[in-house]
Image (cartoon, grey):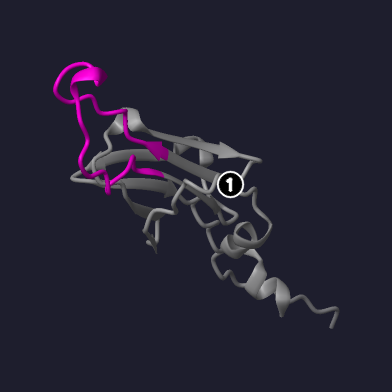
């Protein structure tokens, strides 16, 4: 029973590498279709160059992102910050991929603050067709 709950995607929550305290976990949706797994991760303000995606340990999808340092109004000596509540958005997320996926064909895109990662599934093996079997007799 413990393997049922702590296996798969939950394994990384308990036994994964800890991230630095300043890293947040981005909100994510994971949808499975007949042909692929689709992950949608909120990455507001980040572009394609600000996000790094890689597969580690064979089946762990690692997604990290950080916004570039903003420099508004010229040099740092001329700028006076009065309020800085938004911070520098950084996140890290790791997902253990299920068996039967095509890791080499993973695609990712960023659009309107949402990172979409598509992980294609291996095609299901074809079921053998029923076929009649001849019965022999020695009579």
Q: Residue at (38%, 39%) from the top-left corner?
A: 107
Measured from the top left, where is residue 6 in percent x and y? Answer: 66, 69
Q: Which residues are magenta?
A: 65-90
Looking at the image, residue 2 lies above or below residue 39? below
Prevailing SS of the magenta stretch = loop
Marker count (numbered): 1
In front here: 137 or 14?
14
Measured from the top left, where is residue 63 in percent x and y? Answer: 46, 42
Tell whether 91 sits left or right of 20. left
Looking at the image, residue 23 lies above or below residue 81? below
Tell whether 30 sits left or right of 47. right
Looking at the image, residue 22 lies above or below residue 69? below
Q: Is residue 77 magenta?
A: yes
Tell whether 18 sits left or right of 101. right
Measured from the top left, where is residue 31 in percent x and y? Answer: 38, 62
In front here: 77 or 64?
77
Q: Is residue 6 magenta?
A: no
| Residue picked out by circle 1 | 60
């Amino acid at each position: 029973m413990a393997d049922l709950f702590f296996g798969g995607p939950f394994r990384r929550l308990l036994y994964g590498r800890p991230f630095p305290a300043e890293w947040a976990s981005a909100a994510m949706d994971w949808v499975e279709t007949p042909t692929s797994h689709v992950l949608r991760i909120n990455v507001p303000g980040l572009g394609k160059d600000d996000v790094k995606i890689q597969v580690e340990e064979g089946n762990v999808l690692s997604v990290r992102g950080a916004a570039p340092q903003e420099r508004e109004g010229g040099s740092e000596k001329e700028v006076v910050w009065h309020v800085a509540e938004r911070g520098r958005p950084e996140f890290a997320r790791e997902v253990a991929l299920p068996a039967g996926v095509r890791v080499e064909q993973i695609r990712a895109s960023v659009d309107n603050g949402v990172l979409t990662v598509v992980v294609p599934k291996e095609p299901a093996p074809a079921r053998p067709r029923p076929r009649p079997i001849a019965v022999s007799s020695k009579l």
